Image (spheres, grey):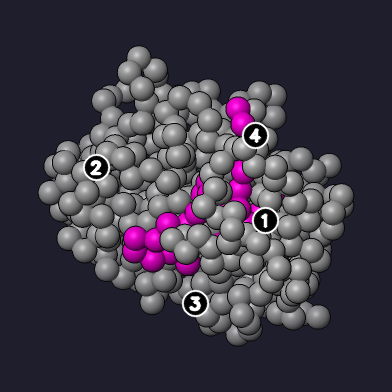
Amino acid sequence: MKMRTTTRMLVHALSALAAASACSTAGAQQHVPLTDPIPGAITPSRAAVALETVASGLVSPVAASAPPGDRRHLYVADQPGQIWRLHLGTNPQPRELFLDVSALLVSPLGVGDNRFDERGLVGLAFHPNFDTNGLFYTFTAQPVRANPDFSTMPPGVAPNCQSVVTEWRVKRPGRRHSAVDLASARELLRIDKPTPLHNGGALAFGPDHMLYVSLGDGNTADDEGAGQAPEGNAQSLAPGNLLGKVLRIDPLGRNAANGRYGIPPDNPFVGKEGADEIFAYGFRNPFRMSIARDGRVFVGDVGQNAVEEVNLVTAGGNYGWRIKEGSFLFDAAGPDGSGFAYADSPGLPASLVDPIAQYDRADSAGGPVTRVAVIGGYVYEGDTLRHLRGRYVFGDYAGRGQPSPQGQLFVLGRYNRIERLVPTNRNPFDLALLGFGQDARGELYVLANDTGTLLGNTGVVLKLVPGRR
């Protein structure tokens, strides 16, 4: 990605003076929106990849993973509520229904004629000891059924839905194709959501055997409306506000306030009332998150209007929203959701952590918008794609606001430079990118559909394989 040189340095110096007032409205500061925050196009990668269909006929596959050591299966979470078990290495690849949680979800799922929705079944993770304990976890958006463990809603104002993390167990751990014990469902967390937007929803286990949970800030543009802290949920560490955060919990522990999970003693905010679970904060919509084998936590955080970002997340870090969008200062602009990025300010304010990579939505000022929302991926840890080994693969949704879906696949190159991965057998990539998956061998899968919504059954799972130039 092309970065500014002299101009960038000048803006950097000037932005230091503006940093202290970064949260001010446009009425107090005469800021000017940037029309082309990051000039230039994203260059293609030299890595030759292709896409091989593994499964089709899904609706909106958004997450996929495999239990550690299980090289025969990939489990795919379809947003309407189904988890499918795919049998790898067979042709055609049969699938079977592993679990259906659709009855638990908000209904109707899908808003308006185009059936777009950010809610549903959006997260899936297997415990590192799944082979012996049979435990796995889901993240779902559910109706308001019970008192929440955490809420930002003012008295008398009902939330739109509740984000729920649930533990499940299979009947016969260690047995191939074991069924789920439906009676084993155990809620760990239930959190009020002010709106249907910015759910986050990714689940991932680290090598520490702790469960990491990504949560969006839960509100509309500029973080307005009921259920929002004055400084924005993402910046708030007030008791009960877990929105706009990455959490770290021990699902096998019981010392949390609700007695259903554990608080790791080395969490960065242990002892701060209502913040024990928080690992990092300052996120707008960390929809997809992954953890590499070496413990690095990667989050793709969806921007508002200008900048999409990839964050390398560490304990206690503040990743900037809504003070910044990417490395750019952000002006919330007033009560109409028209906030904007106005100055590049890498490293300032010093209390914030900038992304390791970022991109904007068009290649030039006034040019067509070709990118819409970052979709976080995985570090490639397989063996078949030598040129991608150890590199972070991710992409852009590009499923709405376009004449037709044109998702994009990216990889981080040297110095975290973003490069486009162009499939040799599917160029252009004419699908909406919804997520990524990783199997037990470290191979990667692309999750997509034709619409970017819950319409139809065009959802596919595509494996990244070597391509030919």
Q: Are the residues at dot 3 and dot 1 in contact (C-beta closer than 8 Å)?
A: no
**Residue hosting label 1:** 343
The stretch drawn in magenta includes residue 91: no
Q: Which residue is mark 3?
A: 381
> Along the horizontal axis of the image, is 267 left or right of 459?
left
Residue 154 image offset from top left, x and y in percent = 36, 22
State the image coordinates of residue 197 (x, y, percent, origin top left).
53, 35
The answer to whether residue 36 is seen in the rendering is yes
Q: Nearer the viewer, residue 129 or 33?
A: 33
* Quadrant in the rendering for residue 176: bottom left
- Of badges 4 and 3, the one in the foreground is 4
Observer able to see residue 249: no
Q: Which mark is residue 33?
A: none
Foreground disc of the pair 4, 1: 4
The residue sitting at 32% across, 23% down in the picture is 145
Q: Nearer the viewer, mark 3 or mark 1?
A: 1
Magenta residues span 306-335
337 to 234, vertically: above or below: above
Residue type highlighted by circle 1: Ala
Specify few, some or many for label 2: CA neighbours under 10 Å numbering under 14, 14-19, or 20 or more. some
- Residue drawn at (80%, 43%), measured in percent from left and top? 402
Q: Amino acid at mark 3?
A: Glu
Residue beneath disc 4: 27
